[in-house]
């Protein structure tokens, strides 16, 4: 047993001579409550940043296409018309999406001159939309 302790003491001495006294100190020797609090805050911040970056790297499926979630607008408004399901980048559609919750094309087909009925919640059924998009 004493041989093992002597070997450990020799190793500690050699390590401290080569790399300094700090290398053989007990890590808890200069640890305090303040350092513990700072450490826990740093871990919390790191975890939040990591989870945010993972969320940004996630892909979301939109109409059969995977899109990075950081490219998707987080607001309530969507770029897809809830009536015809068409995805639009047109600024004109933004106005109608905000006011009538439909694109400009659907506004012309279903809302114009019937705003009161639309605002009360009426929406075209599947058959009506199909008939409108495929006129004979």
Image (cartoon, rainbow, N blue to C red):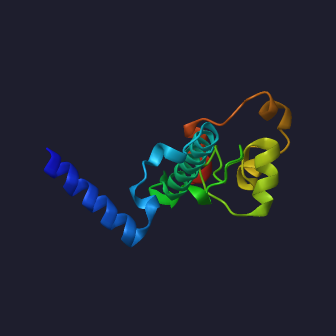
| Whether residue 8 can be seen here | yes
Identify whether 29 is placed above or below 88: above
In-front residue for pair 53/4:
4
In-front residue for pair 40/5:
5
Q: Is 1 situated left or right of 77 in this image?
A: left
Instruction: Name which quarter of the figure residue 113 lies in.
Output: top right
Q: How many marks?
A: 0
Q: Residue at x 41, y 60 (%)?
A: 23
Identify whether 19 is placed above or below 11: below
Image quarter where the C terminus lies is bottom right
Image quarter where the N terminus lies is top left
Residue 39 in picture, x, y percent from top left: 57, 45
Q: Residue at x 62, y 55 (%)?
A: 72
In-front residue for pair 32/57:
32
Residue at the bottom extreme of this rendering: 18
Residue at the top extreme of this rendering: 120
Residue 40 in picture, x, y percent from top left: 57, 41
| Whether residue 62 can be seen here | no
In-front residue for pair 63/48:
48
Q: Is 4 situated left or right of 131 in this image?
A: left
Residue 127 in picture, x, y percent from top left: 55, 39
Q: Residue at x 64, y 44 (%)?
A: 83
Instruction: Name which quarter of the figure residue 64 lies in.
Output: bottom left
Q: Is 122 situated left or right of 114 in this image?
A: left
Instruction: Name which quarter of the figure residue 89 lies in.
Output: bottom right
Residue 128 in picture, x, y percent from top left: 60, 40
Q: Is 84 situated left or right of 98 in this image?
A: left
Q: Residue at x 24, y 54 (%)?
A: 8
């Amino acid at each position: 047993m004493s041989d093992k302790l002597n070997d450990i003491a020799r190793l500690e001495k050699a390590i401290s001579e080569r790399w300094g006294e700090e290398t053989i100190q007990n890590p808890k020797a200069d640890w305090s409550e303040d350092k513990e609090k700072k450490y826990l805050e740093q871990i919390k911040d790191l975890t939040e940043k990591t989870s945010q970056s993972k969320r940004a790297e996630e892909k979301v499926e939109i109409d059969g296409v995977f899109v990075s979630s950081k490219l998707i607008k987080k607001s309530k408004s969507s770029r897809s018309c809830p009536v015809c399901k068409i995805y639009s980048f047109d600024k004109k559609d933004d106005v109608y999406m905000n006011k009538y919750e439909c694109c400009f094309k659907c506004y012309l087909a279903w809302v114009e001159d019937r705003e009161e009925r639309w605002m009360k919640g009426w929406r075209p059924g599947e058959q009506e939309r199909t008939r409108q998009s495929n006129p004979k």
